[in-house]
Image (spheres, helix red, strand yellow):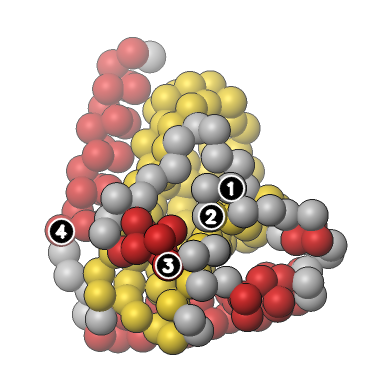
Amino acid sequence: MKKLNVILLTMMVCVLNATSIFGQSESKKNKIIADASTSKAEFIKADPLMKSIFTNAYGYVIFPNVGKGGVGVGGAAGNGAVYEKGQLIGMAKLSQLSIGLQAGGQAYREVIFFESKAAMDRFKDSKFEFSAQVSAVAAKAGASGNAKYTDGVMVFTMQKGGLMYEASVGGQKFTFHKL
């Protein structure tokens, strides 16, 4: 089992590094942007109160397709579109590595809202990452009504499919690429 975990960890690191090394084609960027737009509509459909959060946030990043999986050692990766004051300004990559009790795989959407220019600048400088203490709110009717910014950031997720059992620690790291 230990050997399997080492092999899986090595494979995850290679996959996560490959997604950050290779540039995206224009068609892939356009697909991510279109999927981000669809995801925004899906978040608002799930919780109409989120429309005002999108409108009032200084900026946000939408990861329309995040894939996550693991057996003991896990990882997640996704690409997203970054908006500042409602305007598309760049693309982002999400990568995550986790260790702990986990098995399965899932796909989900994630949106991160930035309350201020300072929080947005931290993200744009690629100095932004989540630790295990950060929690995301599951997007559903009324969920955003009680959501609050923590250190200038608010996170929502929406499961798309899959099944994963997890009790793990790990963090998400982000890389920003200006258009």
Q: Quadrant of the C terminus?
A: bottom left
Is 48 on the left-hand or right-hand side of 119? Answer: right
**Type of amino acid at the residue the image marks with label 4:** Ile
Closer to the observer: label 4 or label 1?
Answer: 1
- Category of crowding for the residue at label 4, using alpha-carbon neighbours closer than 10 angstroms: few (below 14), some (14–19), many (at least 20): few
Which SS class for mark 2? strand
The mark nearer the N terminus, 4 or 2, is 4
For the question of whether residue 167 can be seen, the reply is yes
The residue indicated by pointer 1 is 150
Q: Position of residue 142 (x, y in %)?
A: 84, 62
**Type of amino acid at the residue the image marks with label 1:** Thr
Instruction: Report, in whole angstroms, how far the alpha carbon at label 4 lies from the one at label 1.
Output: 31 Å
The mark nearer the N terminus, 4 or 1, is 4
Closer to the observer: label 3 or label 4?
Answer: 3
Which SS class for mark 1? loop
**Above or below, 49 relative to 173:** below
Nearer-the-camera pick, 113 or 1? 113
Circle number at residue 153: 2
The residue indicated by pointer 4 is 21
Could you say which quadrant of the image residue 158 lies in? bottom right
Q: Position of residue 60 (x, y in %)?
A: 49, 69
**Above or below, 126 relative to 56:** above
Instruction: Report, in whole angstroms, how far the alpha carbon at label 3 lies from the one at label 4.
Output: 28 Å
Closer to the observer: label 2 or label 3?
Answer: 3
Which SS class for mark 3? helix
Circle number at residue 117: 3
The mark nearer the N terminus, 2 or 3, is 3
Q: Are marks 2 and 1 in contact (CB under 8 Å)?
A: yes
Q: Are marks 3 and 1 in contact (CB under 8 Å)?
A: no
